[in-house]
Amino acid sequence: MSEPAPSDNAASGTIAFLGLGHMGGPMAANLIKAGHNVTGYDPVPAAVEAARAHGVPMAGSAAEAVAGAAVVLTMLPSGQHVLDAYRGVGGEPGLLSVAAPDTMFLDCSTINVEEAREAAAIALDAGHRSVDAPVSGGVVGAEAGTLTFMVGALPEDFEAVKPLLELMGKRVVHCGEHGAGQAAKVCNNMILGVSMIAVSEAFVLGEKLGLTHQALFDVAANASGQCWALTTNCPVPGPVPTSPANRDYQPGFAGALMAKDLRLALNALESTGVAAQMGPLASKIYDEFAAGAGAGRDFSGIITDIRDRSAT
């Protein structure tokens, strides 16, 4: 993938990449492969070593990575982590105070919509720019550079970061202003969680009724039951050879992450007063799944839980 011509400093300056786990590490590596100057930081030693193995130069602290950077890209576990990093906690300086004026703060974490809006507000108040750009596509997409980015930003800031996002993903969608990226992410993943449960229940029902997995797949994949949870991430081995079901449900997209995203969707449903029933139920189901071994299995492994609970 060739690097597009930079539109401003955000596309051509140094990038501080904070959070180099299973998603962040490959994303940072793709930016380096495209010729960008990236400095990384992660407090977890294993993440540091993995990032170094992929050619990511490491700083000794988040503040050190951010000093002089044109873009601060964060991929952190929660909204509180993002806000704490921006403001500073425990005597550590906040990234907003360390960064040069007019730095682009690009958050690719998946967090609450209101937290994203709060992060944007404090970044703007500190004299910086802000974009929320959560991702879809999992570890495979991060490694291959085929992620989908859902972006909340002012139009001019979207245009500034779009060349960077296109180096890490195949689809970049401007969803609206601050917080809109997170809004799109929670809506999308609520659909995904609900549909995976429905597809899994249908396969278990088909088993009880004597249908083979292939027969049900061949019908549903070409009829009104067609969906991504069926045709790409099929929860039974065989019909889709690349699905995690063929690798004993190695993620992929882990059950713990689906549980987290559905809790974010539940928070949004409650704050907006939407009379939803399926989203909250899916959140409950995945919370229970992730409380045990399902936390580290692909979210499509929910079918094993449904099968175990079904009457013999």
Image (cartoon, grey):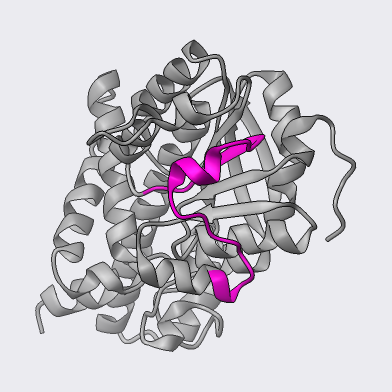
Question: In this orientation, which residue lies closer to the viewer: 310 or 57?
Answer: 57
Asked if residue 181 can be seen in this view, the reply is: yes
Residue at (58% x, 45% y) in the render: 16
Q: Which residues are magenta?
A: 52-76
Q: Is residue 64 magenta?
A: yes
| Quarter occupied by residue 251 | bottom left
Residue at (38% x, 65% y) in the render: 199
Q: Position of residue 97 (x, y in %)?
A: 45, 24
Name of the residue lying farthest toward the right: 5
Q: Is residue 155 left or right of residue 17?
A: right
Residue at (30% x, 29% y) in the render: 268
Q: Is residue 278 above or below residue 267?
A: below
Q: Is residue 93 left or right of residue 307?
A: right
Asked if residue 227 can be seen in this view, the reply is: no
Q: Position of residue 124 (x, y in %)?
A: 52, 15
Q: Position of residue 117 (x, y in %)?
A: 42, 21
